[in-house]
């Protein structure tokens, strides 16, 4: 998996691409929502094996989970928006996409058992055909024991640089358009 730092960055840069002028609540949620799927590591404490539907990279890394998180968020944190309005659907789509960014990025890592994108419909786990992102070990101690530089460098090359580039193109396009 990429680090939670990178998952949070994806949400923040996604937020900048989505909208420049938002309240603090939007920015905090934009950083946190892409991190939520990794809360599934708590399953290890309950003896749930990695390969279980409820294990790491299982249901919490599915498309359905991303939809549920986005719906809960919209009804809990954005009650001022009316369901059915264009703005409501735009925000819902944004939060769904940044929640879904987590399992998609995980599928591009070079480790683990794959991502349960379609759980509970099917229990299969998937990887992307190209997996250039160095997998981050689970646990801060294992991360700091030697892999931190390689993991962060990999994420910088394959996630941060492309997203920053895309954002800069967006800014340039908007300025050019005016």
Image (tube, rainbow, N blue to C red):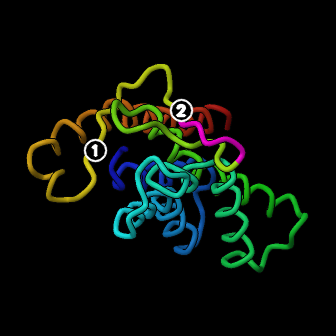
Of residues 112 and 19, the one nearer the viewer is 112
Residue holding disc 1: 136
What is the magenta range? Answer: 121-126
**Earlier-in-chain disc, 2 versus 1:** 2
Label 2: state its secondary structure: loop
Quadrant location of the C terminus in the rendered image: top right
Along the horizontal axis of the image, is 92 left or right of 150? Answer: right
**In the image, is residue 32 above or below residue 116?**
below
Q: Residue furthest top?
A: 129
Q: Main secondary structure of the magenta part?
A: loop
Q: Residue at x 45, y 46 (%)?
A: 51
Quadrant in which residue 80 is drawn: bottom right
Q: Quadrant of residue 82?
A: bottom right
Q: Which residue occupies 51% across, 40% down? A: 115
Give the percent coordinates (x, y) of residue 75. Answer: 74, 75
- Magenta segment includes 28: no
- The reply to whether the magenta stretch includes residue 122 is yes
Specify whether 36 is left or right of 98.
Answer: left
Q: Residue furthest right?
A: 84
Q: Position of residue 145 (x, y in %)?
A: 9, 49
Residue occupying the point 67% across, 41% down: 122
Label 2 environment density (alpha carbons within 10 Å; few <14, some 14–19, many ≥20): some
Residue 65: % across, % down:
64, 57
Q: In the image, is residue 104 above or below residue 41?
A: above
What secondary structure is found at the residue carrying circle 1?
loop
Q: Is residue 75 left or right of residue 155?
A: right
Q: Which residue is mark 2?
A: 126
């Amino acid at each position: 998996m990429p680090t939670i730092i990178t998952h949070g960055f994806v949400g923040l840069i996604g937020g900048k691409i989505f909208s420049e002028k938002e309240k603090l609540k939007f920015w905090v949620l934009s950083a946190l929502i892409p991190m939520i799927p990794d809360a599934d590591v708590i399953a290890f404490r309950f003896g749930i094996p990695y390969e279980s539907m409820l294990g790491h990279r299982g249901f919490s890394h599915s498309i359905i989970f991303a939809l549920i998180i986005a719906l809960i968020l919209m009804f809990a944190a954005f009650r001022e928006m009316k369901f059915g309005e264009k703005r409501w659907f735009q925000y819902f789509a944004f939060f769904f996409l940044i929640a879904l960014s987590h399992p998609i990025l995980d599928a591009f890592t070079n480790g683990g058992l794959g991502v349960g994108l379609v759980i509970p419909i099917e229990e299969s786990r998937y990887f992307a055909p190209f997996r250039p992102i160095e997998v981050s070990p689970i646990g801060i101690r294992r991360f700091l024991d030697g892999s931190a530089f390689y993991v962060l460098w990999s994420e910088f090359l394959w996630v941060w640089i492309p997203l920053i580039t895309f954002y800069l193109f967006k800014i340039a396009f908007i300025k050019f358009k005016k």
